[in-house]
Image (cartoon, helix red, strand yellow):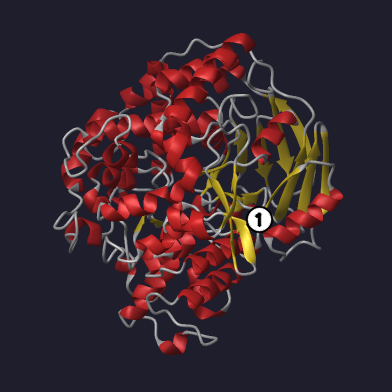
Amino acid sequence: MYGYRGKILRINLTDHSYKMEDLDHELALKYIGGRGLGSKFMADEVDPSVEPFDPANKVMIVTGPLTGTPTPAGGRYMVVTKSPLTGTIASSNSGGYWGSELKFAGYDMLILEGKSPKPVNLFIEDEKVEFRDASHLWGKIVSETTAKLAEEAPDKAKILCIGPAGEKLSKIAAVMNDINRAAGRSGVGAVVGSKNLKAIVVKGSSKPAIADSEKLKEVVKLSRGKLKDNGVTGQGLPTYGTAVLVNIINEGGVFPTNNFQKTYFEKAENISGEHLAENFLIKRESCFACPIACGRYAKADDIEGGGPEYETIWAFGAACGVDDMKAVIKANFWSNEMGLDTISAGVTVATAMELYQRGMIKDSDIEDGLSLKWGDANSMVEWTKKMGLREGLVGDKMAEGAYRLAEHFGMPEVAMTVKKQELPAYDPRGIKGQGLQYATSNRGGCHVRGYMISPEILGLPQKLDRFAIDGKAEWVKIFQDLTAYIDSTGLCLFTSFAIDAQGYADLTNAVCGTNFSDADILEAGDRIWNLERDYNLKAGIDPSQDTLPKRLLKDPIPEGPSKDHVTQLEDMLPKYYEIRGWSEDGIPKPETLEKLGV
């Protein structure tokens, strides 16, 4: 079996047993791996109506066929489960080195079932699997957990864990690996925490077989050349990281400020990628086999660590009215240590600030001399810690995410969420295709389910008029389907700035011995997308939730380059449903599911 290792490791946390199963090769090729294969196993094994923290919910940790191979940026894995934040199927992606190590240990997938009676760690070294007590690590932050486990683990083992936020079932908790890499979105860390699983340590000693090594060398050389020659992957991301976008998005007047009340941040330069590189950057970091090296490692005062990324800088910066890069770096650091999704954490603080602005959170609700005033950088950092630890009334409610925080304080409409997941750093009123993508994302508010910023802002693969709505439904579908495929291979989505569908087919074919075309790639993505949609419908996620916050639908952008625009979602959604092969009510037609083999 080429690319794949052919083994699934099924872990029963309830009785601390395990078994190894053979991977169905035909099924794997149909759903590829990663997100697709994990979602297929969820659909087959987990009742969509299950409560996320019920032991009957499962966690699928899945690599792709290209994970751990020489393909560029082939180090990704997915965490697939039922989301406690949204109620949708969750599939959260992470990089670093842990995913490739799982592949080297001989596994395509881990399936976590049940609930351990006490905190436990899982140690995997090839076919050796151990359950070890984790009581001494429960409550510890991510770096301390990782350091302690490294003392107990084989040399060069890779470590995945949750932080206090996951233990305390924060609905915005992440799964962390390699200290500062995160499977961040949708609260997957809380599901792991609900199972009393603190960490998974992995060490492997063999690599996946390659179908055509000579062909792979040729295709990898071509792919790396494209990545090097591309302005985003060859210049912008290596030089400034993802934060290269700060000034670009702000100058377009679509950089959400003060919780999407404005779209231009006057002090954006103070939190830009350029400012980060010149004043705080210690080094660049890369994931397994990645030629881009977009990761940052920064220091502010006595705090240093991985990041911050563009989305994080925005969430703790402009969204909160903060222009202090030191504070952003510190908030990012504490999010990683607590095991929090940085997008959701920052947006939740911004939501609290607007609730305070509107008198819904009172001074009497706030502890420890903190404030919730726009731009209070020091308080923003402290709220991040409180959120992770569920300290105090407001900190405890923040741990539930922006929507539930706003709902508790009587103004749910100020939560900038879709399907209860916090929106990221692009105002969709001035980027119409991105708005449609937000609304239809299968995991709630998300930018990386179909990154329309690429054509609408960056002009890749071609420049689209970001204010136009004609043709956007077709573009969104293509980007969503391609992304579903990429997420399933184990490759990084950033490669899509330079590599097209046929390029991904060529890489897959060389590794796996398949004969995929670009059309096959998109059909596989379409299959995965419809499978997820079907699961969500069965889970009670009504198509009426394919929408955006009222502010983004009704309130025009007040000023700047995108002035007077609203999203126009209602004009795009019917066409989107039509080209998806869904009913006008947003339900996949039986013939569509049959055609795709769902």
Relative to 27, say whether 572 is above or below: below
Q: Tell me what residue is drawn at x 77 percent, y 25 percent.
A: 206
Q: Please, what secondary structure does the residue beneath circle 1 have? A: loop
Q: Is residue 39 left or right of residue 134?
A: left
Residue at the spot of label 1:
162
For the view shown, which residue lies furthest in the bottom direction?
364
The residue closer to the viewer here, 417 or 298, is 298
Q: Is residue 185 above or below residue 326?
A: above
Between 110 and 587, which is closer to the camera in this rendering? 110
Q: Which residue occupies the foreground of this view, 430 or 87? A: 430
The C terminus is located in which quarter? top left
The image quarter containing residue 576 is: top left
Quarter of the rendering occupied by the N terminus: top right
Say which residue appears at 63% left-offset and 51% top-offset.
176
- Residue found at x 66% / y 55%: 162
**Left or right of 394 in this view: 479:** left
Image coordinates of residue 341 in percent, x first then y, are 52, 56
Residue drawn 15% across the image and 43% down it: 571
